[in-house]
Amino acid sequence: MSIGAKRNRIRIEQATLTSDGHGGSTVAWSPRCVVWAHERPLTGRESLAAQQVTATLSTVFEIWYRTGLSVKDRVKLGARTCEIESIVDPKDDRKELHLACSEVSA
């Protein structure tokens, strides 16, 4: 993938547990990194569950190779939030990563 194709600036966030002051904890998201990416939409579908229409969009973000990412992380692109489903080095050459993500909106 050429440099010019990676036109989207995405933020990859990691979950951290913070104390809620009552003996429990809540999940807070903190930035892990900000990278350039190429977004490749795959599929979209709508479903009806509990009398509510839910839309799911599957997409792949292609980024330059880096270590330290996890499927527990998430991707933010503007106001959109995508959960990372898998992380693949497509050619196993440590040049690029494909983040397969799903975005669910109610």
Image (tube, rainbow, N blue to C red):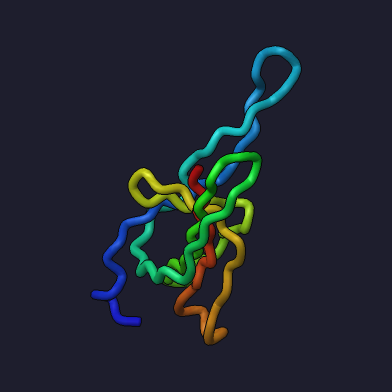
Residue 74: image x %, image y %?
53, 51
Q: Is residue 17 above or below residue 7?
A: above
- The structure residue drawn at horizontal position 46% and vertical position 48%, both measured from the top left corner, is 81
Among all residues in the image, which is located at the extreme top?
22
Residue 87: image x %, image y %?
58, 68
Q: Nearer the viewer, residue 30 or 105?
A: 105
Q: Nearer the viewer, residue 4 or 52?
A: 52
- The structure residue drawn at horizontal position 32% and vertical position 57%, both measured from the top left corner, is 9
Q: Is residue 62 above or below residue 27?
A: below
Describe residue 21's horizontal placement relative to residue 36 as left or right. right
The N terminus sits in image quarter: bottom left
Describe residue 4's horizontal placement relative to residue 62 as left or right. left
Residue 62: image x %, image y %?
43, 71
Q: Quadrant of residue 28?
A: top right
Q: Is residue 90 above or below residue 73?
A: below
Describe residue 36's horizontal placement relative to residue 69 as left or right. left
- The structure residue drawn at horizontal position 24% and vertical position 75%, both measured from the top left corner, is 4
- The structure residue drawn at horizontal position 62% and vertical position 58%, both measured from the top left corner, is 71
Q: Nearer the viewer, residue 48 or 99?
A: 48
Q: State whether residue 87 appears in this view.
A: yes
